[in-house]
Image (tube, rainbow, N blue to C red):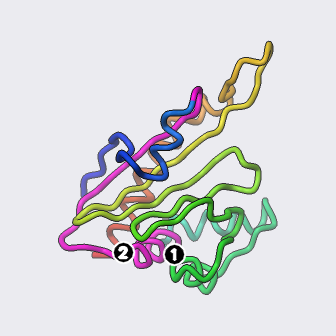
């Protein structure tokens, strides 16, 4: 299964961040046969084995437990919070979640035959007031991209 890095789609919740000065955004996509509802993508994404491991880390390290029932409520539009995230925006085909620190966002979108996953990293004022993402972000960017591709691929496999 192929996952490509691409530009955020125009008009998407992610695209709004891509135009902001010093913000980091990325967007990955993969293709499936047929259409997938957003609720099914959310469920597959957050209940796949790789993300279950992240949920375990969040439960222990961030004291932010989550269950499959929490995922189901988020997918159904019945919840605005999930683990460390809060829904920042939602449309019929996409959802944007901001973490409680306000520094990162996660984004999921469905389109005909396509699944997309993206991230936002919000800059902070560095020395002299210049906006920066910081050295930790830059040192982890390669790993973040590998992980993002693996998450999207895992969700797509689960939906097949």
Q: Residues within 10 Å of mark 2 (few under 14, many from 20)?
A: some
- The quarter of the rendered structure image containing the N terminus is bottom left
Name the secondary structure under disc 2. Answer: helix
Q: Where does the magenta region start and end?
A: 21-47
The residue at which mark 2 appears reads as 158
x and y percentages locating residue 46 in the rendered image: 52, 71
Name the secondary structure under disc 1. Answer: helix
Is residue 86 depicted above or below 43 in this figure? above
The residue at which mark 1 appears reads as 47
Q: Nearer the viewer, residue 6 or 65?
A: 6
Give the Cα separation between the discs numbered 1 and 2.
9 Å
- Residue under the point 28% across and 56% down: 30
Q: In this image, 155 relative to 34: left or right?
A: right
Q: Nearer the viewer, residue 89 or 118?
A: 89
- Residue under the point 60% across and 51% down: 105
Is residue 112 depicted above or below 119 in this figure? below
Is residue 118 depicted above or below 59 in this figure? above
User: In the figure, residue 73 lies in which quadrant?
Assistant: bottom right
- Which label belongs to residue 138? none
x and y percentages locating residue 58 in the rendered image: 71, 63
Q: Earlier in the sequence, mark 1 or mark 2?
A: 1
User: In the figure, residue 155 lies in which quadrant?
Assistant: bottom left
- Residue under the point 27% across and 61% down: 114
Tag 1–tag 2 contact (CB < 8 Å) = yes
């Amino acid at each position: 299964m192929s996952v490509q890095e691409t530009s955020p789609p125009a008009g998407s919740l992610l695209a709004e961040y891509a135009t902001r000065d010093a913000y980091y955004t990325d967007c990955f996509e993969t293709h499936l046969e047929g259409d997938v509802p957003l609720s099914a993508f959310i469920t597959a994404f957050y209940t796949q084995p790789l993300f279950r491991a992240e949920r375990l880390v969040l439960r222990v390290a961030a004291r932010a437990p989550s269950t499959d029932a929490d995922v189901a409520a988020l997918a159904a539009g019945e919840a605005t919070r999930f683990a460390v995230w809060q829904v920042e925006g939602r449309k019929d085909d996409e959802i944007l979640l901001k973490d409680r620190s306000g520094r990162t966002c996660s984004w999921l979108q469905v389109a005909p035959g396509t699944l997309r996953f993206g991230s936002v990293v919000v800059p902070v004022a560095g020395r002299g007031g210049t906006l920066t993402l910081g050295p930790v972000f830059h040192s982890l960017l390669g790993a973040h991209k590998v992980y993002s591709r693996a998450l999207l691929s895992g969700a797509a496999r689960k939906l097949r």
